[in-house]
Image: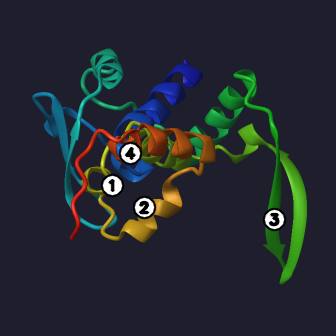
Amino acid sequence: LHFDRARDIFLAGCYTALRHSDYSRIGPEHIKGNHLEIITYKNQKKVRIPIRPELRTILNKWENRIPKMTSQELGRYIKEIGKMAGIDDHIEIKESKGGRDIDSIKYKYELITTHTARRSAATNMYYSKMTVKDIMAITGHSKIETLEMYIGKDDQKRDQRIQESSFFKGSSHLKVV
């Protein structure tokens, strides 16, 4: 039951791009038709987020609220879930400890945190061709530079998106400005 709850809580973050402090408190009062409306803790911004069908399923399962679990508990469970799911690539990490830079190798599942859901959501929105301004309206970011730090870099997807743009297909009329 703990893994089931943890998975659903984490996925709520993946489907909303909210911080754990926000997605963990979603309740019936935040559901407005096919949207969530919630005032975020960190910056007190009201965000409006469409409810994906997968999130609707989770909300229905838990009586229109996200189940409760501390950030620490969730962090432990999602790492275990990641390990069971085979998210076990080796990742080189550079850390600073005691003023010294230390290189280490970790399993990717060890790096999964509650914030991974938010970053994953922003990245998936970006690569699904949602505009940066629309993503910012959902995440509550006020600076593009901050949002850009969230978006995972995928050169192959970027190249594909650029090639598929009407600019490089020659299907758009160009203007001299």
* Mark 3 nearby-residue class (10 Å; few <14, some 14–19, many ≥20): few
C-alpha distance separating marks 4 and 1: 13 Å
C-alpha distance separating marks 3 and 1: 29 Å
Q: Is residue 90 above or below residue 144?
A: above
C-alpha distance separating marks 4 and 2: 11 Å
Q: Give the number of the mark in front: 2 or 3.
A: 2
**Residue 132's mark?**
1
Observer-nearest residue: 128 or 163? 163
* Residue position marked by numbered label 3 in the rendering: 94
The reply to whether discs 2 and 1 touch (Cβ–Cβ < 8 Å) is yes
Q: Give the number of the mark in front: 4 or 2.
A: 2
**Residue 165's mark?**
none
C-alpha distance separating marks 2 and 1: 8 Å
**Residue 147's mark?**
2
Q: Amino acid at mark 2?
A: Leu
* Residue position marked by numbered label 4 in the rendering: 17
Marks 4 and 3, the one that precedes in the sequence: 4
Q: Give the number of the mark in front: 4 or 1.
A: 1
Q: Is residue 171 left or right of residue 69?
A: left
- Which structural element holds mark 1? helix
Q: Amino acid at mark 1?
A: Val
Q: Give the number of the mark in front: 2 or 1.
A: 1
- Farthest residue to the bottom: give it: 99
* Mark 1 nearby-residue class (10 Å; few <14, some 14–19, many ≥20): some
Residue 164: image location, x then y, percent: 42, 37
Kindly identify the residue that appears in the image at 43 percent across and 47 percent down: 122
Kindly identify the residue that appears in the image at 86 percent across and 75 percent down: 101
Q: Is residue 151 above or below residue 66?
A: below
Marks 3 and 1, the one that precedes in the sequence: 3
The reply to whether discs 4 and 2 touch (Cβ–Cβ < 8 Å) is no
Observer-nearest residue: 61 or 113? 113
Q: Amino acid at mark 4?
A: Ala
